[in-house]
């Protein structure tokens, strides 16, 4: 079934006050969302602002026109040249632009790895690593965890344990930073069940606590660490490297999560497939 995303004038405003979109409220507000669509000039102005603050270059946001696409380049190759094809009045591309503004090192690392694989296998084929990188770029999240027991519950797909019995752990011993712009786009539908494809970074409780004290600095550290892992081919070699996490189970993320039955009845809480094993977590 084709995804139908509400237009700016029809989107339910409450989605911007609940996770995951609430985490991006500052950037959206600067751009005038959800009152009106920002133009490319507004995106460019915000890009210039964040670049001057952190010194990290981002590609220019340029209109995706037939003339632009006539250059024959792959989407990733064009980014490597400093141009990001962006459709105006399009949620998917707007949210992708925000991901570039917040996580430039991850984006650059993914782009470099994608271009390397394109150079090796050509533009018409895709490696397993390319598939993994695309899955993460579109639907990914980074999970910070300080408690190996929580990771064990996740390993077993013990969703009631992870989300219900350990519901007080969320925000204290485990936390999520949504990265994928497609997940953010799906979140425009408030009742939607969301599942992200995740990479885990183990840290300590103080590390997770930084989300409440200095989230900008923590995100910059996540950005740098993830970029290093991608560049070293330590993650995203295969789609099976990614852990599915039903985001709708996190307390406060979906109205159904106040009922224990939700975690056994909602279709996003799938059992572990026989033989499925997840790779070990990395560290922050």
Image (tube, rainbow, N blue to C red):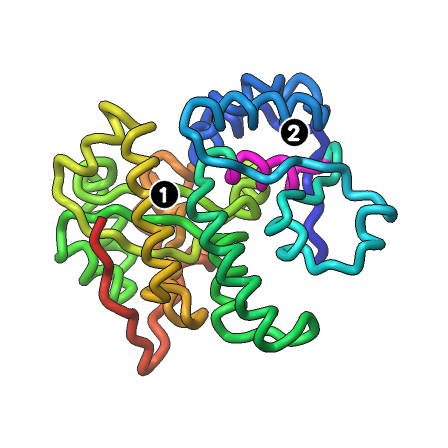
- Taking depth in this image into account, of 95 and 253 the one nearest to the observer is 95
Instruction: Decide if residue 189 is in sight here.
Output: no
Residue located 37% across and 66% down the image = 233
Q: Are marks 2 and 1 in contact (CB under 8 Å)?
A: no
**Residue farthest to the bottom?**
275
Quadrant housing the N terminus: bottom right
The secondary structure type at the circle numbered 2 is loop
* Residue 175 belongs to the span the image colors magenta: no
* x 71%, y 44%: residue: 85
For residue 30, which quarter of the picture? top right
For the stretch drawn in magenta, what is the main secondary structure? helix
Q: Residue at label 1?
A: 223
Q: Within 10 angstroms of label 2, few (less than 14), some, or many (20 or more) residues?
A: some
- Dividing the picture into quadrants, the one containing residue 172 is top left
The residue under label 2 is 11
Which image quadrant for residue 240?
A: bottom left
The answer to whether residue 136 is above or below residue 273 is above
Q: Mark 2 or mark 1: which comes first in sequence?
A: 2
Question: x%, y% of residue 77?
Answer: 64, 57
Q: In this picture, which residue range is highlighted in magenta?
A: 90-100
Q: Is residue 107 above or below residue 55?
A: below
Q: Nearer the viewer, mark 2 or mark 1?
A: 1
Residue 109 is situated, as x and y percent measured from the top left of the image, at: 45, 53
The residue at 70%/19% (across/down) is 36
Q: Secondary structure at mark 1?
A: helix
Relative horizontal placement of residue 9, taking residue 191 as reference (left or right) = right
Image location of residue 235, percent across then percent down: 35, 64
């Amino acid at each position: 079934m084709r995804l139908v995303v509400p237009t700016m004038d029809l989107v339910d405003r409450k989605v911007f006050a609940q996770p995951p979109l609430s985490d991006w409220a500052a950037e959206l507000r600067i751009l005038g969302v959800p009152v009106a669509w920002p133009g490319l000039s507004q995106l460019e102005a915000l890009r210039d602002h964040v670049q001057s603050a952190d010194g990290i270059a981002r590609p220019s946001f340029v209109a995706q026109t037939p003339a632009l696409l006539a250059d024959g380049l792959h989407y990733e190759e064009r980014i490597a040249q400093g141009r990001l094809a962006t459709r105006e009045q399009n949620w998917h591309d707007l949210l992708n632009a925000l991901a570039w503004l917040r996580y430039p090192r991850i984006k650059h690392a993914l782009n470099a790895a994608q271009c390397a694989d394109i150079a090796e296998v050509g533009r018409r084929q895709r490696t397993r690593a390319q598939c993994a990188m695309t899955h993460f770029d579109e639907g990914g999240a980074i999970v910070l965890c300080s408690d190996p027991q929580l990771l064990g519950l996740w390993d077993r797909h013990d969703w009631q344990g992870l989300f219900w019995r350990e519901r007080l752990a969320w925000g204290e011993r485990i936390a999520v930073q949504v990265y994928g712009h497609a997940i953010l786009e799906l979140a425009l539908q408030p009742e939607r069940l969301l599942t992200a494809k995740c990479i885990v970074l183990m840290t300590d409780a103080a590390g997770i606590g930084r989300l409440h004290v200095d989230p900008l600095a923590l995100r910059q550290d996540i950005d740098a660490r993830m970029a290093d892992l991608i560049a070293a081919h330590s993650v995203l070699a295969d789609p099976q490297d990614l852990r599915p996490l039903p985001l709708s189970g996190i307390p406060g993320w979906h109205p159904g999560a106040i009922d224990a039955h939700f975690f056994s009845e909602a279709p996003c809480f799938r059992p572990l497939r026989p033989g499925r094993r997840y790779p070990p977590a990395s560290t922050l």
